[in-house]
Image: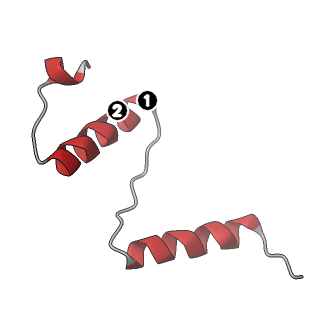
């Protein structure tokens, strides 16, 4: 059994996901997580949430 460094595995996974049209999002803080979550929920549900509805 062979092993490879974790970084190589991560790079390969990101490359495979990009090939499936996933978009890489660089999230550096909690605000970024919430913004991405809101946009993903809106896209999935084909709707738009107000800030009040989303609770931010």
Give yes or no for contact between labels 1 and 2 (Cβ–Cβ under 8 Å).
yes
| Residue 27 in the image, given as x and y percentages of width and height | 44, 44
The foreground one among 41 and 8 is 41
Residue found at x 40% / y 79%: 19
- Dot 1: element: helix
Residue found at x 16% / y 21%: 53
Quadrant for the N terminus, please.
bottom right
Q: Is residue 26 left or right of residue 13?
A: left
| Residue 56 in the image, given as x and y percentages of width and height | 26, 19
6 vs 35: above or below: below
The foreground one among 20 and 31 is 20
- Residue extending farthest to the front is 45
**Quarter location, residue 51:** top left
Q: Which residue is mark 2?
A: 34
- Neighbours of disc 2 within 10 Å: few (<14), some (14-19), many (20+): some
Point out which mark residue 30 bears: 1
50 vs 40: above or below: above
């Amino acid at each position: 059994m062979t092993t490879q460094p974790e970084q190589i595995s991560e790079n390969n996974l990101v490359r495979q996901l990009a090939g499936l049209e996933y978009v890489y999002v660089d999230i550096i803080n909690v605000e970024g997580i919430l913004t991405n979550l809101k946009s993903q929920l809106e896209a999935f549900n084909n709707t738009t949430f107000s800030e009040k509805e989303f609770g931010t």
